Amino acid sequence: MVTVLKAGTTEEQKRMLIKWFEDQGLRVHEYENDNQTVLGLIGDTSGIDVEMLELLDIVEHVALISEPFKKANRKFHPEDSVIDVGGRKIGGGSFAVIAGPCSVETEEQIIEVAKAVKASGATMLRGGAFKPRTSPYDFQGLKAEGLKLLLEAKRETGLPIVTEIMNQDHLDLFEDVDVIQVGARNMQNFELLKELGRTDKPILLKRGLANTIKELLMSAEYIMSGGNENVILCERGIRTFETYTRNTLDLSVIPVLHNLTHLPVVVDPSHATGHSDLVEPMAMAATAGGADGLMIEVHNNPPMALCDGAQSLTPLQFEETMKKVRRIREVVA
Ligand SMILES: O=C[C@H](O)[C@H](O)COP(=O)(O)O
Ligand SMILES: C=C(OP(=O)(O)O)C(=O)O
């Protein structure tokens, strides 16, 4: 429910109304829209008498909002959220490129890739240390050692690091990580989301393999309702009947999410396509479609990668892709 206040409402009148809402067990999110003060009410509003509320001198009107997501909802927060990651911004016109290998493998590998992607214009470094693998026999990541190597690459290049968490018990290890990624497979790991809601770290939340937009937003809501509003959404392709590509990239999600939410939207064309030759065209398409950023896998020797080599660009291919992405940004920004 939102309550729009009349122009001329005094600060004291507004405070009294907010206090009354809070006494009803509601949380109040206040914002300005078209020079009007709007109070977004979060919680169970079934006990509020809407007609009585509309009779108050200071109330312009009351609108019922049926969407179940509140904190992430653009109706409650019309301006784009801009997430600051160590001085690199994402959202509200600021574009981020998160690039790096699927997995951290060795010190030489991560530092070489970090330097290369930085030189081509990446704004953040990605690299998996805890890997969610389909097979328990596949490379599971270097775990804590991988995080140390990422921090080493950050020291060398200054690039903020983005890496995936799979288990809330590992949270202490992520203290120096700049952006914590929740992978597709954990998008609905609600205990993990709740725990991340208690941190103040930016969270990159990937859409699940077969999840709807609404489910993605409800997962963001888990993090935000816990107090952490630094959420970046990521489309990485969804499961469809099509098997030529690894997943089907749902590009329409970009304008849909921009309508529904103020949170930044990043697209990962690497996991979406599974083929390195499809990464560049889909990176360009996502940029043209209004994405706030890209996540792209880059490996110094893709055929030898321990995970996802087929979808990884070489540093040279990444450099070429970045040139095209920049040209598209000049047109759409
Ligand atoms: O980013 C890497 C993921 O862990 C990888 O895509 C998992 O897929 P797979 O284990 O099915 O190869
Ligand atoms: C595992 C990853 O991606 P996703 O969760 O999208 O499969 C990843 O980015 O390393």
Image (cartoon, rainbow, N blue to C red):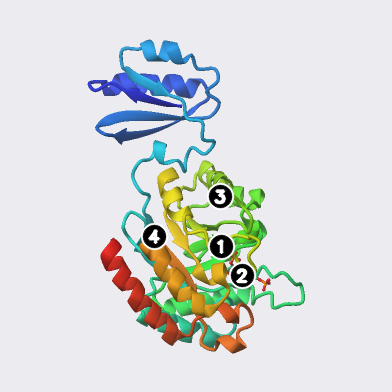
Q: Please say if 247 is above or below 81.
A: below
Q: Circle 4 is placed at which residue position?
A: 289
Crowding at mark 3 (Cα within 10 Å: few <14, some 14-19, many 20+): many
User: Residue 54: image x %, image y %?
Assistant: 38, 14
- In this view, the residue in front, 134 or 274, is 274
User: Which amino acid type is marked by label 1?
Assistant: Gly
Disc 4 marks a residue whose amino acid type is: Gly
From the Cβ of disc 1, is ligand 2 less than 8 Å away?
A: yes
Q: Amino acid at mark 2?
A: Arg
Element under label 4? loop
Q: CA gap, disc 1 to disc 2? A: 8 Å
The residue carrying mark 3 is: 216
Q: Earlier in the sequence, mark 4 or mark 1?
A: 1
Q: Does label 2 point to a residue whose CB lies under 8 Å from ligand 1?
A: no
Q: Is residue 289 left or right of residue 249?
A: left
Is the residue marked 3 within 8 Å of ligand 2, measured from its CB? no
**How many angstroms separate mark 4 from mark 2 (CA)?**
21 Å
Q: Is residue 104 visible?
A: no
Disc nearer the start of the sequence (2/3): 3
Residue 45 visible in the picture: yes
As displayed, is residue 222 above or below residue 49? below
Q: Amino acid at mark 3?
A: Leu
Give the Cα separation between the discs numbered 3 and 1: 13 Å
Please report contact status of discs 1 and 2: CB closer than 8 Å, yes or no.
Answer: yes
Q: Where is mark 2, residue-wise?
A: 246
Q: Which residue is mark 1?
A: 237
Side of 123 relative to 147 (left or right): left
Residue 281 horizontal/vertical position (percent): 44, 73
Q: Secondary structure at mark 1?
A: loop
Q: Are marks 3 and 4 in contact (CB under 8 Å)?
A: no
Measured as percent of width and height from the top left, residue 272 is found at 55, 67
Q: Residue furthest right?
A: 137
